[in-house]
Each structure stands twice: as structure tokens, then as C-alpha cells.
Image (spheres, grey):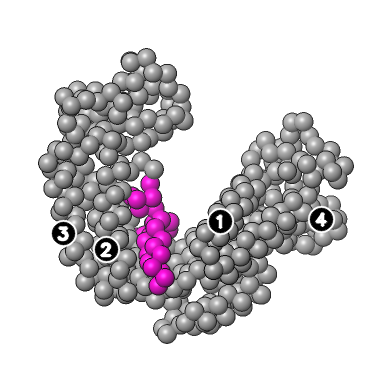
Amino acid sequence: MQMDLAFQDGILIPWRKRQPEGFKSASQLLLTDKGGLTYAPILGLHEAIGELDFASMYPSLMAKYNISPETINCTCCPENRVPEIGHHLCKKRRGLVPRFLEPFLEKRARYKHLKKTASDPAKRRVYDERQSALKWGLVTTFGYQGYKNARFGKIEAHEAITAYAREKLLQAKEIAEDAGFEMLHAIVDSLWLKRAGATEADYEALCERISRDCEIPIAFEGIYSWLLFPPSKTNPKIGVPNRYLGCFRSGKTKLRGIEVRRGDTPYFIKKAQQNLINILSKASNAQAYRAALPEVGTCFEQYRDQLRSGQVPFFELAIAKSLSKAPEDDQKASLSAIVAKELAGRGVHLVPGQAIAYVITDMKAKLPSDRARAIGFIDGAWGYDIEKYESLLREALEVLIPNP
């Protein structure tokens, strides 16, 4: 679509891109080669937390500030500086990429409005699916700026986008704190805020102020009945920025980075954790959340007993992994490498990037080939490693338990 617009406008389209990255010193590289700004979350269980999200932040910045490969570091506008990193942008001509993005951003905004105002649930679902499709197209457009072979990409444009994003997140944080809100967490284009007694109208007013002062739209997602930032598995004193779970006052849950969201989590573990979360989703605040933990423990014990019975179907225990190497090139005795070699020995041709699925049969087996078996070739003569799967189940429980 970018090339189509270029063709319509009479812009030459390179057959192969041969534009190298501009030279940077080590200090310049450290300054410019950054991603989005991320804060460490305040660990623990919180209640009455509001979430604000910038709408299509990166594409909106590209359109607002005219960020495009032919406008970055132009020869005519050296004074129009990008915050922090020193690049500059053209003010005399509109870039190809911003012009390409404008109709996408407008259409997504219309669909989001239609979704919010529609009374028919079926129509709301359709509008949500359409705005979501546009969202991922817009995300791809940003990522393509950093791809070395993108015909209309340039790494300096990519750096300018992330520099503006960091600046806008800092501005939003300062505006929120000036309005009396405390920031519990922020990651790239989202903020989690708290102020005693704050209503939805207060958050909407804050959004209007941030949108006006930051010059890109930010939306109020809702107020959480409870929100949990669990600690890192490797260090209990720090959190993981993209790992949290919460339940809005509307009853909708939001889960990020935990087992139920991971592609390599066995179905049995996902099912168990989702049911545990369903119990917690009924809680209206942090106190009710903690009061529901005994029921969560009882439910966990039921799933643990199922595992210990040895009767859980193999397909519910399958772990999916993508291969990073061809089987013959992998010298490690990891479970995925063991299974890949088993499949190769059975005549299955595998290539890097291909997904395989296996069941852990005995993690402590001396013979590596006995530790895991491919799901397609395992039969009733094999059992599964109850201790290992129970450990995975316990991890899925522990992420839901807040610190005292």
C-alpha cells in the first residue's frame, strides 16, 4: 500500500534498497538506539487503579511529526529537532509514510467510536475486530521503519519515533502527577494511575488534558477492581514490566505475560490457571481478592489430584516450542532438542522456526531420549512426569498469590 501511494504520486520505488545507516559514534549510538520507555511496576495487589493508553502511539507520532525516511535529517529544516537524540525533521513537505498512515488512523478512530456507542453486541464485536486488525497493521508500519530492507524504511526514522514516544510518556506522567495521581506503572504507551476517590469522569478529564498537551490522543481504558503486579521469578524484589493481571469494574479481565497467555504453556495448566482467575474475577476489591484465595487453593488441589492420578490426557500436557536450529546442529540436551532428534530419526524433516510439541516423560532420566517424547508418537506405554507438571501447576498458582 505504501508502494501504491508512491506510484500514484510519481515517487521512484527502489528495486532493492541500498541506503546504509548513517554513521554514528559510540556515544551517539547509546543515545539514539533506545526503545520505548518502561518503568518498573510497584509490586503487589492494588485496587481502584485506572489505566490510560495512547491510541496507536507510534503511528500517531509518525503522522503528527511528519516522520518518514525522506523527511528525517533533511537539508532544509535543521532547527526542527527531535527530542533528546538530535535528529531533525522536514517542515516543508509532507512525508510519504505520514500520508499513508492518516486514513488508517482516522478509520480506526471511527471504528473505536462505533464500538463504544453501538448497542448491539454483535456489531460491537465486529467493530472491535476491525479496529484490532487496523491496530496491528499500524504496529507493523512502525516496525517496518527499522527493517534494513524496507523500501520506505530508515533506522533514523525509527529512532525518532521512539524518542518522541519516550518524551510523550514522560509528559503524561508529569501531567498526571500534577493532577494528584500516583503512577504505579508505565510501559511505552500505557500508564496505570491511582488517586483516592478518583472517578471515571476524573480519568476522562485527565485524558483530555494529556491529549491536548501531548498532541496525540490517549484513551481511558477503565478502573480496575483489583490489579496484581507479581514479582519476577528470578528476583522477588523486582517486577516484570509486561507481566500483570487485573479485573476491571466491568468484569473484564486483562492478563499479560502469565501462563495462560503463553504459547508454550500446556493446555491443562492454562485451563487450571484460567479457572483460578475466574474465581478471583468475582472479587470487587483487594480485600475480596484475598478472601477468595482459600477457594482458589481448593480448586488448585483438585487439579493437582488430577495430575497425581496419572490420567490426564497427553494432548492436554503437550508443550509447544519453536526450533531455533536444525536438529543436527543442536548440541544441547534441551527437551526440544531431544524431541527434534527423535522426530528426525523417524524421518520427519524439520527446519528452524518450525514448531514441535512434546510431553515431559521423566526429567530425571539418565538417558536423554527418555526425558520427553513427541506428542505424535507417544503411546500408553509411557507416562508423564507428575512431579514436573505439578511444579508447572504450582507456578501458575503462585503468580496469583500476592505478597502478605
Q: At label 1, which amino acid type do we have?
A: Val
Residue to which mark 2 is pinned: 279
The residue shown at (46%, 82%) is 198
User: Are circles 1 and 3 on residues that touch, CB within 8 Å?
Assistant: no
CA distance separating discs 3 and 2: 11 Å
Q: At label 4, which amino acid type do we have?
A: Arg
Instruction: Tell me the element at label 2.
Output: helix
Tell me the quarter of the picture where residue 230 sits.
Answer: bottom left
Residue 395 picture location, percent across and down = 25, 51
Closer to the N terminus: mark 3 or mark 2?
Answer: 2
Residue to which mark 1 is pinned: 126
Q: Quadrant of the N terminus?
A: top right
- Magenta segment boundaries in residue numbering: 238-262
Viewer-nearest of discs 4 and 3: 3
Closer to the N terminus: mark 4 or mark 3?
Answer: 4
Residue to which mark 4 is pinned: 94
CA distance separating discs 2 and 1: 29 Å
Residue 88: mark = none
Find the residue positioned furthest to the bottom.
197
